Image: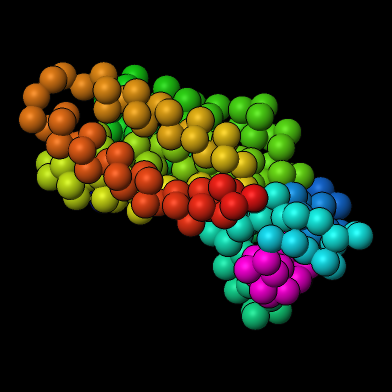
Amino acid sequence: SEGPPPPRSRRWLLGFWAAVFAAFLAVSPGRMTFDTKLGVVADPWRFLGDLGELWHSRAGFGGIADQYVGYAIPMLPYYGAADLLHVPVWLAERLWLSLIVATAFWGALRLAERLRVGSPATRLLGAVVYALWPTYTIVVGSTSAAALPGALLPWVLLPLTNPRLAPRIAAARSALLIPLMGGVNAASTLASLLPVGLYLLSRPGGPRKRALLAWWIPGVILATAWWIVPLLLF
């Protein structure tokens, strides 16, 4: 059902996030990590102001900004809020990384519960493995934007698995989460959308399947247009 998750599952989420956050804090506390683009974490407002130009004159000897607009959601709003709240950059980075990993864990667990895969114990184990698989643990500290699409994948799929939702509502809820995957790496974002499309294509034929596809595909186009159009200009 689409009801709230059981309290025990919420406790697993909080416990997992706290453990991951503590692990990130334990590594070089007080020191920044070079996460993707230094300007995003060090001066998010200037970086945001530069997004309207294809040519960036303040970077080295100048150059064309390759998919920089992809940082507009959700990284720049997060680091902009951290800057307004005067959160130290190193602490904001550790919190950001922990939120990505916890999002992957929680989404995988909710999806396994929705699909009734395995037992409660194996669902929990699968969610932990999904959140901590080597690709995440290798890139999340230096290229967190590359981990975002995979972390959001279960959440984008989750509304489409709810038979109680009307197709247009399910597709809209799914599409509204796609911008949170970011647009820094087009290949990563599109690759993470591929399993969602395969899920829809593998559904039994009928009016619901056709309606889901008819609503979801335009939703994906609209949800990615904010970075696809600048990419075409680039």
Residue 50 belongs to magenta span: yes
Side of 169 where 73 appears, left or right: right
Frontmost residue, 195 versus 60: 60
Q: In this rendering, would 153 be left or right of 212?
A: right
Q: Main secondary structure of the magenta part?
A: helix
Residue placed at 19% from the left, 50% from the top?
169
Quadrant position of residue 73: bottom right
* Residue at x-position 81% and y-position 48%: 27
Could you tell me if residue 22 is visible in this image?
no
Asked if one can make out residue 138 in the rendered structure from this viewpoint, the answer is yes
Q: Nearer the viewer, residue 206 or 29?
A: 206
Left or right of residue 74: residue 115: left
The colour scheme is rainbow
User: In the image, residue 129 lies at what x, y percent?
Assistant: 55, 27
Residue 177's place in the image compared with 139, above or below, is below
x, y (%) of residue 48? 65, 70
Q: Magenta stretch containing residue 191, yes or no?
A: no
Q: Quadrant of the N terminus?
A: top left
In the image, what residue occupies the spot 91% across and 60% down?
61
Residue segment shown in magenta? 39-53
Residue in the picture at 34% in, 23% down: 198
Image coords of residue 17 (percent x, y)? 56, 49
